[in-house]
Image (cartoon, rainbow, N blue to C red):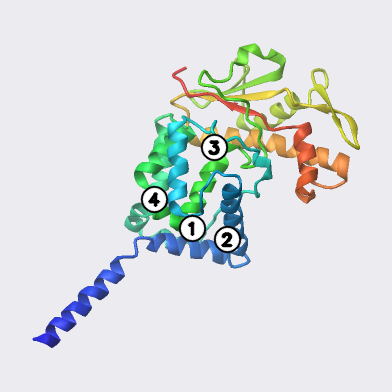
Amino acid sequence: MKSFLLILFISVLLLTCNSSNKYEFEDQFMECVYAESGDGGETIKENLRNFENAFVEKGIFESTQGDAYISFLEKIVENKGLSFVKIDFSDFPEPWGLACNKEEIYNDTAGVNASGFGKFFRLINGVAERGEISIVNISEEMLEEFSASDFEHDFYKNCFFMVMNFSISPMGIDVTLPPISEEGIDLKKLDPKDVLHVKVGSNNEIEINTSKTIEASEVKSTCKAFLLDTLHFSTIKIDGFGEQHSSNKKIISLKNTKETSYEVYLEVYNEIKSAYNEIWDEKSKELFNKGYEELSREQQKVIQKIYPMVISEAEPNDN
């Protein structure tokens, strides 16, 4: 009888252990990501630690523990945005992405849907479908779905920083956002020539300054022409390089409706980012004879000072 009870106890214990790994899919996914990264995931892991440490050093996080992530999300909701974060994100490490092309990982549909991976993307898609593409709404959803213990796992930590990368700045680190007040940015007070209005409408049409409709493939060239306009520009003095034409007074205003497709919105967003990327690269070659990615952090700051990425995102509306 004692032998039977012992065997029963061991069996139950083993079953419990086997079913207790709530992060089974996340573990498999991250293992795949690391395996496909080319260096066993060392760069991804290092980037994550650098980003965490930067958040701690800047006083955004109290620690690198999961409860620090939750606390930060709560502050975003409480302050209705990121206006409480008074720092220069240009000092932060470069952002990164995750990719796993191992198809069998996704074959277990039920497992994927029940995992954090499934929850995370359902969360983002749900927010987008409701026309609530904002860091506040995403933070509220993340607080409902995830706990501090979840943010002890690298999968969730990476998801967090990818959301911050998109929400804090289109490039994650190299963006200067206009000052935000409770009333928002009053674009009407700015010189109309300093604002490029880009709107993704209810039928996913892309309007420029309410008077012209263009294709997504034309967004980048349109933004570049606006930022590099030699008929309307300001000048800025850069040590060692003298007076430089600058776009430091210009803003690209991006707006969407509640019916806007999230995929189209992101496509337009990425095209705007690409415009800045190309301008930065071109200016880098002009001043330093090498591409932007080859520059030191201090040299990159020079380029960003001349052409700061300034994008104003308006709250979605019905028209």
In-front residue for pair 220/79: 79
**Above or below 187: residue 172:** below
Q: Which numbered tag is attached to residue 154?
A: 1
Q: Amino acid at mark 2?
A: Lys
Rendering coords of residue 194 (x, y %)? 71, 18
The CA distance from mark 4 to mark 2 is 22 Å
Which of label 4 and label 3 is nearer to you? 3
Q: Which residue is mark 3?
A: 167
Q: Quadrant of residue 219?
A: top right
Cβ atoms under marks 1 and 2 closer than 8 Å: yes
In-front residue for pair 206/228: 228
The N terminus - image quarter: bottom left
**Above or below 39: residue 130:** above
Name the element at disc 4: helix
> Crowding at label 1, few (<14), some or many (≥20) Cα neighbours within 10 Å?
some
Inspect this view and state whether residue 263 appears: yes
Name the element at disc 3: helix
Mark toward the start of the polypeptide (1 vs 2): 2
Q: Which numbered tag is attached to residue 118?
A: 4
Name the element at disc 2: helix
Q: Quadrant of residue 73?
A: top left
Q: Amino acid at mark 4?
A: Gly
